[in-house]
Image (spheres, rainbow, N blue to C red):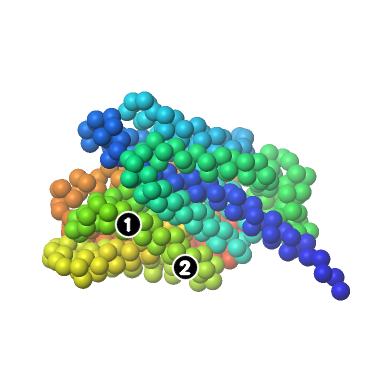
Amino acid sequence: MNTSESPQAVARTTVIFTCILAALAGLMFGLDIGVISGATQFIQKDFNIDDHTVEWIVSAMMLGAAIGALGAAWMSSALGRKKSLIAGAVLFVLGSLLCAFAWSPITLILARIVLGLAIGIATFTAPLYLAEVAPEKIRGSMISLYQLMITTGILVAFLSDLAFSAAGAWRWMLGIIAIPGVLFLFGVFFLPDSPRWLMMRGRKPDAIKVLKRLRGDDGIVDHEIADIEEQLKQPQLGWHLFQQNKNFRRSVGLGVLLQLMQQFTGMNVVMYYAPKIFQTMGYDTHAQLWFTAIVGLTNVLATFIAIGFVDRLGRKPMLYAGFVVMALGLGVVGAMMHMGINGKGEQYFTVGMLLLFIVGFAMSAGPLIWTLCSEVQPLKGRDFGIGASTFTNWVGNYIVGLTFLSLLNGIGNANTFWLYAALNVIFIGLTFWLVPETKGVTLEQIETRLMAGKPLRAIGR
Ligand code: BGC
């Protein structure tokens, strides 16, 4: 009896290991999102600065990330996905150490921009890389894994903020995330180059070598190489393609829209301002931080729903369910705030509804938007297309983060939540009209249908 593992089984393990490592980029993303909410009050006291300067310290990271995502589009094409991930990791370690040792608000803002650059590069390159190395059968789950790492990063950051908050040690909060950064940097050296990128650079023998390790089946390798070769015959790239090709403009537009939808679900309102929201529900400081940690945990756990179902049920059913749940959760939170939250029972109920919203996001828009954005772009313009959508993710993130407090002050608590609930209802319609179902379809098939001018909702199945 032959007890040794088949080449396919070895290849499957290799591909999963590869994806896990690349998904660690998501961990850094999450640490970055989560870490600042707990640190700002101590920074403000230490530097004796006004709210406006605090806003700058918070949002400098999003600004850097938007720039980093744009730069990464060029870098991942010129230097490759792997080298871009390495550059992202180096900047991440540097940025977090600079934050920890910042001696003035200005240096902290600059350090946050460096950190943002790192995250921009990582958030652009990691999903691109994942889509290029994962076989299509597990592609959805693999990219959901990336989201799982984001949510884990957020949770860890919430918990570490909680731990350091007794001492008010904001430098530790911001600096400690350099450690996972170093681990990631170490791991990334073991990643193979993306076979698609190798083919783009004319390095077919290298591409075959990598694909053999990732697929373990010569037939599949030959097939994939032939597919990629076929697509590389089209001579346009990026911006050039965008100017010339209407179909490419459609897929770029879809990516941008998808990321706007993700950000305007209102998720980051909760990520940046959870303690503040719990304060408006009537909780004291201690309870606020604990509930914030529960939000982080819920976000991680509900991501498993997406991982388990995305490649079985498909992307669209999950998105529908998610937007409905989010609209419901936020709608009820708004109603409770409108009526006034009196007594423990009503407080818990409102917290439960906010957690329901988190579940809705984590099982749908959180992971699936990243999945879809990396799936719908044609190979020749993939770097540009994903660059545009990732850039939009950060711009949307920036706007949502920057306007929440003004919305609360301007239109009131209830209306603010109802506004986001209404947006989620609109997204149900947009999903129906514009989003394709990409479950079990190869990237090559999606590209062929897009370029044949099929309606966006029909470029998948
Ligand atoms: C989003 C982030 C968000 C996170 C929350 C990600 O998919 O892009 O903006 O903070 O999910 O889990």
Which secondary structure lies at badge 2? helix
Which secondary structure lies at badge 1? helix
Q: Position of residue 259 (x, y in %)?
A: 40, 51
Identify the residue shown where x is 24% and y is 31%.
49
Res. 317 image quadrant: bottom left
Q: Which residue occupies the foreground of this view, 455 or 217?
A: 217
Q: Nearer the viewer, mark 2 or mark 1?
A: 1
Picture layout, residue 277 above or below residue 172: below
Identify the residue shown where x is 30% and y is 45%.
401
Three-letter amino acid code at the position of disc 2? Ile
Q: Earlier in the sequence, mark 2 or mark 1?
A: 1
Instruction: Residue 305: give its label.
Output: 2
Q: Does residue 424 show up?
A: yes
User: Where's the N terminus, which quadrant?
Assistant: bottom right
Verify CB contact (< 8 Å) between mark 2 and mark 1: no
Gap between marks 2 and 1 measured at Cα: 24 Å
Picture layout, residue 268 above or below residue 40: below
Question: Is 458 left, or right, of 337 in this rendering?
Answer: right
Residue for badge 1:
290
Q: Counting other residues with Cα less than 10 Å from the Cα at mark 1, is it few (<14), some (14-19), or many (20 or more)?
A: some
Q: Counting other residues with Cα less than 10 Å from the Cα at mark 2, is it few (<14), some (14-19), or many (20 or more)?
A: some
Res. 35 image quadrant: top left
For ligand 1, tell me if the residue under mark 1 lies within 8 Å.
Answer: no
